[in-house]
Image (tube, rainbow, N blue to C red):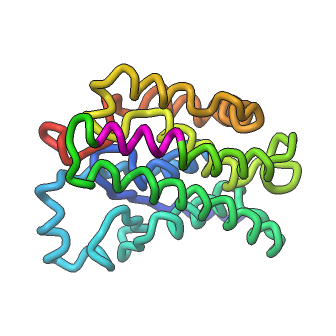
Amino acid sequence: MASPPPAKRYKLSYFDCRGRAELTRILFAYGGIDYEDDRVKRADMAELKAKGVLPFGQFPVLSIDGGPCYSQSYAIAKYVAKIVGLMPADPEAQLACDMIILTTEDVRSKIIPIRYSGKVGDERLALYRNFYENVLPGFLANFEKQLAGRKNFVGDSLSIADIAVFNMCLYLTFPCCEVQAADAAAKQQQETCLDGFPGIQALKEQVGCIPGIKNWLDARPQQEHDNVVTMTGK
């Protein structure tokens, strides 16, 4: 009887924070897939660029069996989703997954630039307050509508779409930067931003209880916020 082929060796490289690598880390955790969680210091990124390691000069990147790196966070996440059985085979179901995944990116594209806006203190907090009060609710209402009382976004089983929304919920309820982390009112606004959206709340709880994912959330490096630029030693 032939021996099974050896398991592939995966190396996911990103900064020492959650950011654009966390969706893939969660997918690896769900599938129980061993991989190297390579956390690169910001000071070392220039050298990697100079060596041509990064295909488009940015993180995250995934290498397989020591081969060349692949970039683009959602391309990487979708690849891992296929490995762990969370990418539907049906083309229309894949389309539906992409719709959800890319809408979570629409949300990210509204909140992440705030920390790089150049605003500080109360002015930055005002931008976050506007996002949570006037921008986010419309997105969450549409996600809730798409869920339509079901447990999963696409079909009757868990898919990458559910994991993507779960990951979105995690970063929406966690300080994006040191300014949010230091302000009690801002943190309270984050912690309650899913109130009024019971379907999304239920999905977040459901996915967070999956053993592999729960173990990752319990074991992953702890941090006060997700702005690697202001983290000492990162």
Q: Quadrant of residue 104?
A: bottom right
Q: Nearer the viewer, residue 198 or 159?
A: 198
Magenta-drawn segment: 124-133
Please identify the quadrant where the N terminus is shown.
bottom right
x and y, in percent, of residue 8 in the image: 50, 62
- Rendered position, 114 above or below 9: above
Q: Residue at x 53, y 54 (%)?
A: 107
Whether residue 2 sits left or right of residue 92 in the image: it is left
Whether residue 58 sits left or right of residue 137 in the image: it is left
Q: Nearer the viewer, residue 221 or 66?
A: 221
Whether residue 98 sits left or right of residue 150 in the image: it is left
The main secondary structure of the magenta stretch is helix
Please identify the quadrant where the C terminus is shown.
top left
Q: Nearer the viewer, residue 168 or 207?
A: 168
Q: Residue at x 38, y 52 (%)?
A: 112
Q: Residue at x 48, y 54 (%)?
A: 108
x and y, in percent, of residue 120 in the image: 20, 42
Q: Residue at x 45, y 59 (%)?
A: 109
Membership of 99 in magenta stretch = no
- Rendered position, 140 above or below 73: above
Q: Farthest residue toward the top? A: 184
Q: Quadrant of residue 98?
A: bottom right
x and y, in percent, of residue 224 in the image: 31, 29
Count of labels in the image: 0
